[in-house]
Amino acid sequence: MGSEKKGQPNVLFVAFDDLNDWESVLAGHPQAHTPNFDRLAEQGILFTNAHAAGTMCNPSRASVITGLHPTATGVYRNNDTPFDLYKTKQTLNKHFKDNGYFVAGAGKILHKFYYEKDDWDEFVGRHKGEGLITNRENPDTASITKLRGSSLSWGPFNAPDSMTFDAKSVEWVSERINRKHDKPFFLACGIFRPHIPWFNPQQYFDMHPLDKIKLPLVKENDLDDVPLIGKNIAFSTTNFTKANDLRNSEHNTENETFKKDGQWEEAVQAYLASVSYADAQFGKLLDALENSPYADNTIIVLWSDHGWHLGEKEHWRKATLWEEVTRVPLIISAPGMQVGEKSKEAVSLIDIFPTLIELCGLPTIDELEGESLVPQLQNPKAQRDMPAISSIGPEYHAVRDEQFRYITYGNGQEELYDHDQDPNEWTNIADNPQYAEVKQKLKK
């Protein structure tokens, strides 16, 4: 593979929506089929203990683009408005543009496909075009299945990838990769799947036959040792946009309906199909870069805004402080750094911004709250002191280090899990006096 003149590296910045650890390399589900995620992991460092700072699209993406925790951005939920934030802070893309990069992007980088026009050389959020299957559309209406009384829906359709929304984003970014550039580029590509609705071409459902689907491991009465607020969150279905959403601990409607209507396997199949579809689109982007003159001098950052529950902890969405939501895929491949290794250190998505600043030699920004991951890219066994912090609101936070997850909901409502003994977070040991010191350290 040839390379243009060396100098500042290019950046390919790829964001996925609602992608949990169901990739082969992260082993979150035994039937995951993700050859392209796995291919990138072989070319860079896979962070196996990476976490989102916010647990919904809006706060997580606001934190990544500003390098600040929700406690600094004030953006905790999807209905918070971060537009002043993007105008007043030096965002990641603006920092690259101000420092001589060609900066362009497509798809969903910020919530609701928002972008600050002057902070990009080119950007297209929502694609238009005849015959295009939009990100929430299924042209085969007869194949759509809906969960009774819920917004969750899924189903296959017969159309080639090339007619789908994410394929258009990939095509758009690939075209810019293949241009002749006279300055380094920062190209962002937002891939919408596996965000709901889980509508994908039939071939991706076929990869995961329904009669062979394995359900996630769950524990009966798993919420018995979870504090009241934790139960409220598990039972929530609206990302807390309705006033009563955090007052319900009686009726776990979605989980009960999935079990009653026998649709759990179908939903797992549809999510796995969505992940395989997203992986295939990413593969086309990877191919475009590998076949370009810029292959040897481009940093690739792959991340997801947050994870997703599929029945674990009796929950079916995002917006919790448990492992299924805060833990996300994060892979960084950079010229001159280690390849094919894993880092187990707890890291945060807000670490991406300072990492790229260091790798690309850009001016530092003092107010960034993350820490550069370059030490781990050089030596995957390098240790960090700072745990990863995830937040749902000013009072609700999770702290994750290499071994433990501590959750506080304020008012003394707490959870603590030891991942060495309990990787599924089934046993809350917050009240166990043996762990008082651990809890105190993480609480700090």
Image: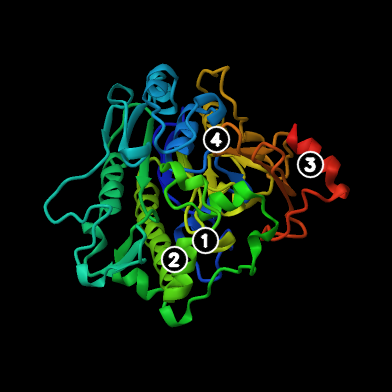
Residue with the mark numbered 1: 22
Q: Which of marks 2 and 3 is nearer the N terminus?
A: 2
Looking at the rendering, which quadrant does residue 124 occupy? top left
Q: Residue at x 39, y 67 (%)?
A: 270
Which tag, 3 or 1, sits closer to the chain's start?
A: 1
Q: Is 174 located above or below residue 273 in the figure?
A: above
* Front of the two marks 2 and 4: 4
Q: Residue 55 location, x and y as percent?
A: 51, 43
CB within 8 Å, label 1 to label 2: yes
- The residue depicted at 55 percent of the width and 42 percent of the height is 52
Mark 4 or 3, nearer chain start: 4
In the foreground, 14 or 192: 192
The disc, 1 or 2, on the residue closer to the chain's N-terminal end is 1
Assess disc 2: are there few (<14), some (14-19) or many (≥20) residues with their C-alpha within 10 Å of its C-alpha.
many
Residue 439 tag number: 3
Q: Is residue 209 above or below residue 298?
A: below
The quarter of the image holding the C terminus is: top right
Front position in the image: 396 or 302: 396
Q: Which mark is residue 393?
A: 4
Q: Tell me if residue 89 can be seen.
A: yes
Cα–Cα gap, marks 2 and 4:
30 Å
Whole-angstrom CA distance, mark 3 to mark 1, is 29 Å
Where residue 91 appears, as percent x and y from the top left, is: 43, 24
Q: Name the residue under label 2.
A: 272
> Residue at 77% across / 60% down in the picture?
421
Q: Quick one: label 1 or label 4, which is nearer the N terminus?
A: 1
